[in-house]
Structure formats: C-alpha cells, structure tokens
Image (cartoon, grey):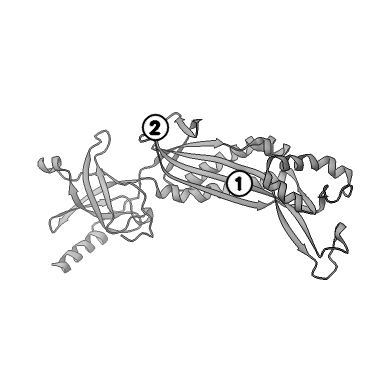
C-alpha cells in the first residue's frame, strides 16, 4: 500500500502537473522614516546635508524591500508622543515598517603609532621622548532601528537595532596638533578652517572629547567624504534588515488546482514552493478568498518543487464539514511567518 501511494504521488508530481508560475500575494507595507539625530552635535556641513541623508535612507530602504520581490511599498508617516507612535497614510497596508535613524554622527577613533626603535616618517613634537604617537582618525557612526508594526493589533511584531562605524578617508598631511598639548604648533589657516567644528564635537559628545583629549594629532576629512561614508553605512544597514523583515511577514499563496484524492486524502496544488520557504510537513491556514473572510481549515505540505507544492487537507472547520464542503480552487493558504528554507520541520 505504501508503495502504491508513493507511486501515485510521483505520477502527480511528474506527469499530472501543468506548469504554474509561483505568485504569492504581495504584501503592502507602509514605510515610515523617523529622524532622531541630534543636529546640534553635527558639524556645519553634516547639518546642511542631513535632509539629503534622510531622503537617501528612505530610497535605499524602498529599494532593499523591493528587491525581496513580494512587497509593495507606500510612503507613510508617524507622530510621536512619549515614544508611542501613531501611524497614518493613504492606501490599505498589511503592516508598517518603521525605520528610526538614531545616529549618523561624525566621531573619531584613536590609533597608536609605534616607532619600534626606528625613526618614523614623522615623529612630531614628541621626537626624542615617547616611542609612540596617538592620532585621532575621522569616522562616521550610524545607528538604525527597524520595527515591524501590526496596525490592527497595535503591536510591534519584530524589531532590530543595527550599529556601524567606518573611518572616513583623510589626507595624511592635513591635521591639527592637539591645542591643549601643543599650543601654537598648527598653522593658523587650519585652525580657522577646522577647529570650530572639532570643538563643537567635543562639547556635544563626551566620548569624542575624551578621544581627542588624549590624541596628539587630529586628522581632517573632507565634507563630501563624510556624507558618502554616512550614506554607505546607512545603505548597508538598510539592506541587512530586509531578510529578517521578509521572514516575519505572512506568506500567502493560493490553491491552484484540486488533485485526485489518494487514500481518502484530499490533495491540492499550491502556487508557492521551496523558493518561498515551503518544506514538507509545514502546515498552512486556509481561508476563503476576500470578501468572504472565512477560515476553511488547514493543509500540510507533502512535497515541494521550486515554485509549487502538493498539500493534503489536515483539518476542516466544523461548519464546513456539516455542509459537506471541502477545499476550493483559489482558496488562500497562509503561513503567519514566511518559513525559512533552512528550517527542518
């Protein structure tokens, strides 16, 4: 009997199926960007460029989500009161993707340069004294938070926080000697051009103040390089969230065909498969197509190929059993979360 069943299933999979393109339902997401960066702590050029940075983040997040292939993105907005957000926008959406920009700041990272007993290319004012020098290198630090919000239940389904820091390209010949350690050592033009921004960073960021205080030289980066590194960091962070968002949003397909019963089991073909995360023994809820909004029951995946699957009826709602009904063509099959292909059920 088992051999007969296996042979029957093989014939269904190989001979009885017509090609069908996998067309899981597109999720519509409302994309919200909230900027919580303290502009007072930014250099003048980053303050002026910050709106461009936020606009670029929105576009990069849209592109990252679009590349997943099953999302439609609408621009939404939010108002905040004591860290509680109220979301609003046009169009009907399945969930809100709320991106919160916490930080996109200019900072410094210290590096120790040792001479190891040989004459370094440049010893500076410590020549004949210490065998090392501490230099402060310009950097950008970014922090991004992403929340997946269910509007109907007013709950956060999933959230993640990402941090990243990168050294900004700098000219090794353009630097300021620490004025507290070496007053009068820096050319006055460099002081006029760069010291004001550095002092603002010291006043608004205690960590930067401590780093600059112990360094011997402060290297300078160009404004355009600051912006490019900030954009690159936020782009990388935005891309890093798309996969997790995908896994935490429902996967929805349809019953594309009613198949002959095997051993009394009602079998159906689904229009989604392995490339969407389906694996044998995965169970999916079955609902009547809108506007019925009626739960039908549950099916269990039996066999999958890349874009389709065969499932069997696992459970039917009581009222449908009483009426002698079963699964219908175009019934919706839904997994509350998109299953990961790596999960073994």
42 to 232, vertically: above or below: above
Return the x and y of residue 204 as percentages of the image width and height: 69, 40
The location of residue 158, given as percent across then percent down, is: 42, 45
Q: Earlier in the sequence, mark 1 or mark 2?
A: 2
Q: Nearer the viewer, residue 10 or 122?
A: 122
Residue at position x 44%, y 28% from top? 90
Q: Is residue 82 left or right of residue 140?
A: left
Q: Is residue 292 above or below residue 324?
A: above
The quadrant in which the N terminus is found is bottom left
Nearest the camera: 306 or 211? 211
For residue 44, above or below residue 171: above
**Residue at (71% x, 49% y) in the render:** 210
Residue lying furthest bottom in this view? Answer: 117
Pointer 1 with pointer 2, Cβ within 8 A: no
Residue wearing tag 2: 92
Number of the front mark, 1 or 2: 1
> Local crowd at mark 2 within 10 Å, few (<14), some, or many (≥20)?
few
User: How far across and down, in percent of the image, does residue 110 sit?
Assistant: 72, 55
Q: Residue at x 44, y 39 (%)?
A: 72
Residue 142 numbered mark, or none: 1
Please say whether residue 80 is visible from this viewpoint. yes
Label 2: which secondary element:
loop
Residue 105 pos. (x, y %): 65, 43
In terms of secondary structure, where does tag 1 sit? strand
In front here: 162 or 230? 162
| Crowd rating for badge 1 (residues with CA inside 10 Å; few <14, some 14–19, many 20+) | many
Quadrant into which the C terminus falls? bottom left
Q: Is residue 324 left or right of residue 63?
A: left
Say which quarter of the image contains residue 115.
bottom right
| Left or right of 306 on screen, residue 4 | left
Is residue 225 visible in the rendered image? The answer is no
Could you say which quadrant of the image residue 282 lies in? Answer: bottom left
């Amino acid at each position: 009997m088992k051999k007969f069943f296996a042979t029957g299933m093989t014939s269904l999979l190989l001979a009885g199926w017509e090609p069908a393109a996998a067309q899981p339902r597109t999720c519509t997401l409302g994309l919200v960007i909230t900027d919580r960066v303290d502009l007072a702590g930014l250099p003048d050029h980053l303050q002026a460029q910050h709106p461009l940075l936020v606009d670029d983040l929105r576009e990069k997040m849209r592109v990252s989500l679009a590349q997943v292939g099953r999302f439609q993105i609408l621009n939404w907005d939010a108002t905040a009161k004591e860290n509680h957000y109220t979301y609003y926008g046009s169009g009907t959406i399945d969930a809100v993707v709320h991106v919160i920009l916490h930080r996109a700041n200019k900072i410094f990272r210290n590096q120790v340069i040792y001479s190891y007993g040989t004459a370094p290319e440049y010893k500076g004012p410590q020549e004949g004294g210490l065998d090392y020098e501490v230099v402060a290198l310009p950097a950008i630090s970014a922090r991004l938070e992403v929340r997946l919000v269910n509007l109907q239940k007013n709950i956060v389904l999933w959230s993640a926080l990402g941090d990243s820091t990168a050294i900004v390209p700098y000219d090794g010949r353009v630097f300021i000697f620490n004025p507290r350690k070496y007053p009068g050592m820096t050319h006055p033009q460099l002081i006029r051009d760069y010291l004001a921004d550095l002092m603002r960073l010291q006043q608004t960021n205690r960590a930067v103040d401590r780093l600059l205080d112990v360094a011997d030289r402060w290297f300078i980066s160009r404004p355009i390089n600051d912006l490019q590194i900030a954009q690159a960091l936020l782009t990388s962070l935005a891309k890093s969230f798309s996969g997790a968002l995908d896994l935490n949003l429902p996967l929805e397909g349809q019953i594309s065909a009613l198949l002959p019963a095997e051993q009394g089991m009602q079998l159906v073909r689904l229009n989604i498969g392995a490339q969407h995360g389906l694996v044998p023994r995965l169970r999916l809820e079955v609902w009547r197509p809108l506007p019925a909004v009626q739960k039908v029951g549950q099916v269990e995946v039996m066999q999958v190929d890349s874009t389709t699957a065969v499932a069997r009826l696992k459970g039917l709602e009581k009222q449908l059993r009483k009426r002698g009904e079963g699964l219908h063509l175009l019934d919706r099959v839904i997994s509350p979360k998109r299953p990961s292909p790596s999960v073994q059920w």
